[in-house]
Amino acid sequence: MKIAFISDMHGNAKALDAVLDDIKNKGIDKTLVLGDICYRGPEPKRSLDLVRSLNTEVIKGNADEWVVRGVQTGEVPEQAIELMNKERDWTVSQLGQSDIDYLSSLPTQINLEADGTTIHGFHATPDSLFEVVLPNTDDDVLDTKLMQAANAHVYVYAHIHKPYIRYLNGKVIMNIGSVGLPFDGLAKASYGLIEIEDGNLKTSIQRVSYDVESVVKLYQETNYPNTDMMIRVIRNGKI
């Protein structure tokens, strides 16, 4: 069985198009979504429609929560709140009430069993949509923050936009990176792939090229509130 985990589209529907094409071409059996669908990209509505058309399990990310109720004090640097809420308001203006209601109703965790392998998925940590757990985090912190489901064999999360795979206590921790806004310096969409067959387990990070400049053009044409910064991120694959 092949299972794809995608996340952090951030309104970059062109990157999502490319990833979904790659998933189809690889003959992947199931695709699951770990949140951050709309906010900070030029095509929030189309990104959400693509995700909903998958008819699969989707969980909430911090950016989905922001779309629902705005960015609040303490969640980002104080000097960024005003601009980020302008971005949020622009995003909401592109959506309908049913879209907002959908984002609001999303669960926060996925539990999946496939061929004897149990997978626990969440956006940032099981307890938080916002907490940051980076690739170089100490083993004991990974254990405490991410591996709370004792029966799981694989722990999958997103949020940090920096994909990695680590092995701890005979188990796998995978961060799947970001479809729409990678932060690791590689300007290609990222997603995670888990392959399970006859008791064997294979985990990998997939990187997919897409037309970055077409997304740059969309930011410019839609008068997105934070165009210059977002274009730099899209082109460079980092903040």
Image (cartoon, rainbow, N blue to C red):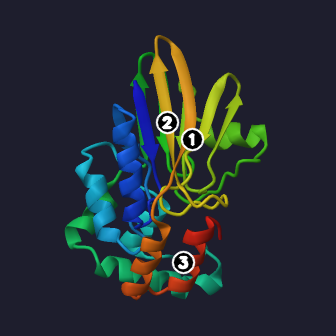
Query: Residue at the spot x=40%, y=67% of the render?
Result: 11
* N-term-proximal mark, 2 vs 1: 2
What is the C-alpha distance between the residues marked 2 and 3?
A: 28 Å
The picture places residue 213, in percent across and down from the top left corner, at 48, 73
Q: Quadrant of the N terminus?
A: top left
The picture places residue 234, in percent across and down from the top left corner, at 55, 70
Query: Along the line of sight, which residue is nearer the eye, 16 or 92?
Result: 16
Residue 33: tell me if it is visible. yes
Amino acid carrying mark 2 in the image: Leu
Mark 2 and mark 1 residues within 8 Å of each other at the beta carbon:
yes
What is the C-alpha distance between the residues marked 3 and 1?
A: 24 Å
The mark found on residue 231 in the picture is: 3
| SS under mark 2 | strand
The mark found on residue 205 in the picture is: 1
Query: Residue at the spot x=52%, y=76% of the render?
Result: 72
Q: Which residue is mark 2?
A: 193
Residue 40: tell me if it is visible. no
Amino acid carrying mark 3 in the image: Ile
Query: Residue at the spot x=24%, y=45% of the render?
Result: 55
Determine whether, in the image, residue 48 is placed left or right of residue 18: left
Query: Residue at the spot x=22%, y=72% of the render?
Result: 97
| SS under mark 1 | strand
Q: How many residues crowd around disc 1 within 10 Å: few (fewer than 14), some, or many (20 or more)?
A: some
| SS under mark 3 | helix
Amino acid carrying mark 1 in the image: Ile
* N-term-proximal mark, 2 vs 3: 2
